[in-house]
Image: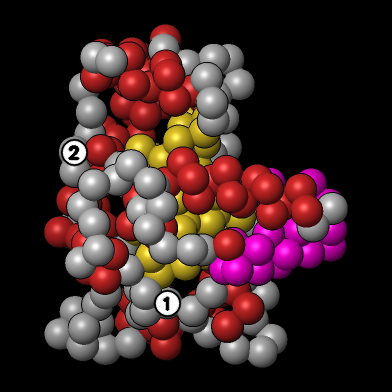
Amino acid sequence: MAARDYLSFYAERFPTVELDSTFYRTPPAAVVKGWYAKTPAEFIFAAKAPRAITHEKVLVDCEAEWRQYLGTMELLGEKLGPILFQFGYFNQSAFRGAEEFMERLVPFMKRLPKDRRFAVEIRNRKWLDERFVEALRERGVALALLDQAWMPRPWELAAGIDPITADFTYVRWLGDRKGIEKVTKVWEKPVVDRRAEIGRWAEVLRGFVETRRGLKIFAYANNHYAGFGPHTVRLFQEEWDRKR
């Protein structure tokens, strides 16, 4: 089919999508309006914040970029779901540790609008301690939960750390990009059996829902997790139903 029909086709089968394109640049207003028009009433867009904010300026002097981005994404109205701030791995030349990063992150979070959902993803595993998680919880910002090559999954976190920091949680099944690209670069079928891992995710997430009334889960898979993102989502749906 033509590329212009992809989103409508997808939205007939899944209730939400994570926008990766917004990481590279703020889209034109006409594009955002087109996304809105091509999707059903209940469809939800999660969106990655631009890398100019998270990677290039790392939250410093980025007010203009943030205002432009948020103003544009607000054109999605009720279809705009969580906005994800995906940070990369920081070496010691960027930050000496989590505390120094938090000195920059916390003031930024305080300025976020309270009528929208936000999530933060970090890729420094040693930073995932109680103080970092509590800083997110105090501001109702979700900690992004990852299944990725070098980050701990929820059941692998240190004892006492509760990874649910908002009225929703944000899950990303990302896998090992370099590893899977040694097997395939044609994303049309699963090439890694992830049923055991997805079964564990379903079990853990159902436990979160059962102990937190009204908790909402936004979960997304890319092709690098198992070879074919839609298969991963279907697999999770199967395992979720099995855990009932």
Which residue lies at the image location 59% right of the left edge and 50% below the top edge? Answer: 235
Q: Amino acid at mark 1?
A: Met
Quadrant containing the N terminus in the rendered view: top left
Residue 2 lies in what quarter of the image?
top left
Residue 100 lies in what quarter of the image?
bottom left
Mark 2 nearby-residue class (10 Å; few <14, some 14–19, many ≥20):
some
Identify the secondary structure beneath mark 2. loop
Q: Is residue 129 rendered magenta in the image? A: no
Q: Position of residue 71 (x, y in %)?
A: 34, 28
Q: Position of residue 182 (x, y in %)?
A: 20, 67
The answer to which of 175 and 207 lies nearer the viewer is: 175
Q: Which mark is residue 151?
A: 1
Q: Earlier in the sequence, mark 1 or mark 2?
A: 2
Which residue lies at the image location 42% right of the left edge and 63% below the top edge? Answer: 192
The answer to which of 150 and 29 lies nearer the viewer is: 150
User: Is residue 75 visible in this depiction of the protein?
Assistant: no
Q: Position of residue 244 (x, y in %)?
A: 84, 53
Q: Which mark is residue 25?
A: 2
User: Is residue 183 visible in this depiction of the protein?
Assistant: yes
Q: Is residue 205 rendered magenta in the image? A: yes
Q: Nearer the viewer, mark 1 or mark 2?
A: 1
The answer to which of 1 and 147 lies nearer the viewer is: 1
Q: Amino acid at mark 2?
A: Arg
Residue range in magenta is 196-218
